Amino acid sequence: MMLEIRGLSAHYGRIEALRGIDIAVDEGELVALVGANGAGKTTLLRALSGVHPASAGAVRFEGRDITALMPERRVDLGILQVPEGRQVFGPLSVEDNLRLGAYRRHGPDVEADIRRMFQMFPILAQRRRLPAGTLSGGQQQMLAMARALMGQPRLLLLDEPSMGLAPILVAEIFTAVKELKRQGTTIFLVEQNAHAALAIADRGYVLETGRVVLTDTGTALLHDARVKEAYLGL
Amino acid sequence: MTSTFLQFLFSGLTLGAIYALAGLGFSIIYNASHVINFAQGEFLMIGAMATVSLVGLGLPLELAIPLAVAIAAAVGVALARFAVVPAGDASVVTVIIITIGASILLRGVAQVVWDKEFHALPAFSGTVPISVLGATMLPQSLWVMGVSLAAILALGWFFGRTMAGKAMLAVSYSRLGAQLVGVPIRRVLLTSFALSAGLGAIGGIVVAPITFTSYEAGVMLGLKGFSAAVLGGLGNGLGAVLGGLVVGIAEAMSAGYLSSAYKDATAFVIILVVLFFLPNGLLGHKGSERV
C-alpha cells in the first residue's frame, strides 16, 4: 500500500473530528472519500498533509511512518494537496502561483512543467500575468490543481474540487482528474458530490461523524442502498 | 518663506525615512504572522547602541555598523524563536502582548548592558551643512535618505523578484496554501524577524548622529513606525514607506509652524484619524475576497 492510515484520530479543541480512521490507498488507485458536511473529510486531508496534528494513530507513506513529519517534508515525499477553497495566492500572478507550486524543486524542468500546465489548462496561459485573485472560481480551482501538480505529486489529495462550481466546470475538473489517473498519479479524492466522485473512483469510503462506516468499490457504493439514500438523493 | 518650508521639508523627509524603515519592519512581521511586533522600536535602539559600543571599543564605523546590524538581527531571531514560536497557536492578541513584554525586557537589558545616558554617533561624513535653495541640510540627512532608499529598493527587489521573497508573501496571502506547497512557515517567521530587526537597526544607526540614542530611544521610533505602517495599510510595504514620509513630514511641519511641544502628538493624531476614517490605511486592501 502506498498510503496506510491506521486508527487515526484528530481533535479541534475538545471535539473529536476523526475517530480511529482506517484507510488505505494503493499506488495508481483513485480512491474517493464521501460524506456529509462536517463528517471530518477536510480534517483528514489536513492531517495527511501535516497541517493538522493527529492525536492518535499512524499514517504510513510508502512504508515510512510520517505521522509527525513537518508539512514541507511531506511535500518532498510527493504528497501534494489541492485544498478546499483553492487557497491560491491572490495578489501574485498566475505564473508565480505555479512557480511556488514547485517551491521544493529546483532546476530548469520547472519552466517545462509550467508550459505543460498551460497546455493542460489553456485558460491559465491566457491569464498568466494576472493576479490569481482576479480569476473566476473555476479558473482558481484549475490553478490550485496545476499548482499542486507543479510539486510532482506521487499522491494527490483533492479536497472538494467541485465545490461552488457550475456543472460544466465540474465536468471539466473531473475530466482532468481522470486524465491524471490515466497518467499514473495516485489520487485520494474527497467530495460531497458523491455521485461524480464514486463514478470515477476505483474504491470508496463513506465517512460519518469522524468514522468510516462503509467501504467498497466505487461502482458498488454507487449502487448501495444506504449510500443512495443518504448521499445521492435517490 | 520658501526656504523655511524647505527646511522643514528636509527635516521631515529625514525623519520620515526612519519611520518608513520602522514601519516596513512592522509590515514584514505582520505579513508572516499577523502579529504586530511592539518590540520593533527596540531593534532601532539595539542597532544604534551596539554601534556606539563597538565604536567605543575602537572599531571603525564601517565594521561596527554591519556587526551591530547582525547583532540586532540575532536578537530578532532569538525573540521569534524563544518568545513567539513557543506561543504556538495562541491567539494573535496573546503574541502581541508577548512582544510588548519583550520590548520592556529589551529596554531593561539595554540599561544593564549599556547605561541610561544619551549617546551620539559621529556623523558619517562631517557636519558641515549643505545649502540647498536657501535651506540647509546636514550631510547625515543625505545618508539617512540614501541608505533608507537603498534598503527599501533592496527589500522591493527581494519581495518582488526572488522566489524566497514571494514565498514569504505567499504565507501572508494564504498560510494554508503556502504550507501545502512546502513553504516552511516557521523559517519564514524567523526570517521575517531577522529582516525587520536588521532593517530597524539600519534606521536606528543612520539617524543616531542626528537624534542621539539611549536605551529608551526605541519607544518613540517604534510607535511612529507603527503609525506609518497603520497609515499606509498594515502589511503593505509601499504603504509603510508612504506612511513613514507622511508622518515624518507632518511631524516636522507641526513642529515648525505650530509648536515643537506637539511634534510627538502628530503621529498619534494621524493614527486616530486613520482608525476613524480609513481603517484599511491608504493602500491597505479591503477585507473582502472571492469565495
Image (spheres, coloured by chain):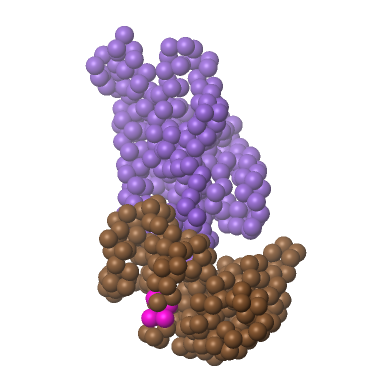
Where residue B95 appears, x then y in whole percent? 63, 49
Residue at image point 39% right, 76% down: A176
| Residue at the extreme left | B133
Note the chain letter of the brown one.
A
Residue A56 higher or lower than A88, as above or below:
below
Residue B161 higher or lower than B129, as above or below:
below
Where residue A159 appears, x then y in whole percent? 52, 70
Closest to the observer: B267 or A147?
A147
Left or right relative to B79: residue A93: left
Left or right relative to A130: residue B261: right
Residue B84 seen: yes
Where residue A76 appears, x then y in whole percent? 45, 76
Residue at image point 34% right, 28% down: B141
Q: Is residue B135 magenta?
A: no
| Residue at the extreme top | B1
Residue at image point 45% right, 27% down: B247
Number of residue marks: 0
Residue A203 seen: no
Closest to the observer: A187 or A138?
A138
Where residue B221 appears, x then y in whole percent? 50, 32
User: If the image is split into quadrants, where does the N terminus of chain A sit?
Assistant: bottom right
Q: Does the magenta stretch include residue A178?
A: yes
Tell me which segment is drawn in magenta: A176-180
Closest to the observer: B178 or B257?
B178
Left or right relative to A54: residue B268: left
Place residue A207 in its image quadrant: bottom right
Place residue B108 in its image quadrant: top right
| Residue at the extreme front | A234
User: If the image is split into quadrants, where does the C terminus of chain A sit?
Assistant: bottom right
Please name the color used to draw chain B.
Answer: purple
